[in-house]
Amino acid sequence: MSIFTRRKRTESMTIEEDAVRFVRLKSIDPLVIDVAEEFLLPSNVVVDGKIIDSETLATILDGAIGQWGISKRSVQFLAPDQYVIIRKVPYPDDIMTDELKGHFFIEIGSTLYLPFDDPVFDVVSYIPNTETNEAIIIASKESVLDRYEEVLKDVKLNPIKADITPLALYRLVYQQHSFTGDEHILLADLKLGKLTVSIFHQHYPLFMRPVDLENMTDMSVVKDVNGETGIVTPSTIVMELEKIINFYRYNMGNGAASITHILVNGEYSRMDELVAIITDRLNVKTDVVVKQPMQLATGEEVPARFNRIIGLALKEV
């Protein structure tokens, strides 16, 4: 390689329901963020993970990338949680590892059913299980991802990778916590009245489920101590976590595996109370994903709503 050849940078961006966010890392040890900026989106531009108003989104994106100086760059982004599934599935003994994707391409729609009529997927062999051959399928809805790619291309960006939030957050967890992989880790990601739960063991993602907390039938949404409405109570969150923990233990683990650690992510006005209640009621070691707020190179604190995209940016390191 010529010493004058400049390595092409892949930028990290998220398009979420409330904002478009951009992060660039300066260093990882210590983890220092060079840029963490956002442009807020009007309501009804992105709804439940779907781009509804692509023209408005493109206009906002065009101004954002101009300010961030990333025009014509390659970008990676996160697939919306509502259109991502993670599933552990068996496969026959005579299928080699490099044949897995072809095998499941044939099986999807015949013996293996996914909740999308147009799935795009990746598959990896699940090594920790030695009794049967199992693989992990990570799938999303192709038409939804295509819409994201189309908008990014419209503003002269080059979308090259779509990642998923659980993997992005787990990179941050791995960087922030001293886990060996033997743990059974539940990630509880809170965002805009929604909870996305994912479970990891031996650094593999085994499970993912999004839960719309605000549309639950019980009295889960109350006014908080500051008078702000639309706050989901800690008890409701704990109730949902308990259901998933039991499902993992008895349905996925056959009673032999249980959650050992819970890590909570997001901006939540009752976070300390939530962590305390989870620890007390579920008797599981519980903490937040990022113990101390991360900082820009200038020393300014980076809000927790950037954690997902920081984890995404770690993919390029």
Image (tube, grey):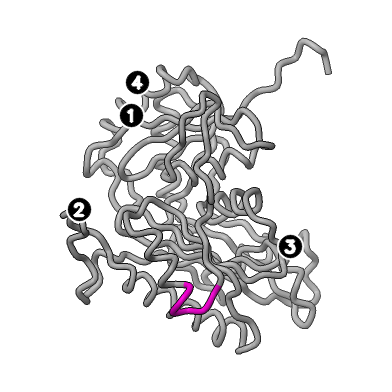
Magenta stretch, residue numbers:
279-284
Q: Nearer the viewer, mark 4 or mark 1?
A: 4
User: Label 1 belongs to which residue?
Assistant: 58
User: What's under tag 1, amino acid-wise?
Assistant: Ala
> Real-space Cα distance between discs 2 and 1?
36 Å
User: Label 2 belongs to which residue?
Assistant: 226
The quadrant of the rendering that contains the N terminus is top right
Q: Examine the image and state in which quarter residue 216 appears.
A: bottom left
Q: Nearer the viewer, mark 3 or mark 2?
A: 2
> Real-space Cα distance between discs 1 and 3?
42 Å
Q: Position of residue 3 (x, y in %)?
A: 81, 12
- Count neighbours of disc 3 (C-alpha within 10 A) and say few if under 14, some if 14 to 19, many if 20 or more: few
Front residue (pair 166, 101)? 166
The quadrant of the rendering that contains the C terminus is top right
- Count neighbours of disc 4 (C-alpha within 10 A) and say few if under 14, some if 14 to 19, many if 20 or more: few
Q: Nearer the viewer, mark 2 or mark 1?
A: 2
User: Label 4 belongs to which residue?
Assistant: 63
Residue occupying the point 45% across, 22% down: 156
Q: Is residue 259 magenta?
A: no
User: Label 3 belongs to which residue?
Assistant: 180
Residue occupying the point 28% across, 67% down: 233
Front residue (pair 299, 41)? 299
Front residue (pair 292, 166)? 292
Q: Position of residue 255 (x, y in %)?
A: 61, 89
- Count neighbours of disc 2 (C-alpha within 10 A) and say few if under 14, some if 14 to 19, many if 20 or more: few
Q: Nearer the viewer, mark 1 or mark 3?
A: 3
Q: Main secondary structure of the magenta part?
A: helix
User: What's under tag 2, amino acid-wise?
Assistant: Asn
* Sequence-earlier tag: 2 or 1: 1
SS at circle 3: loop
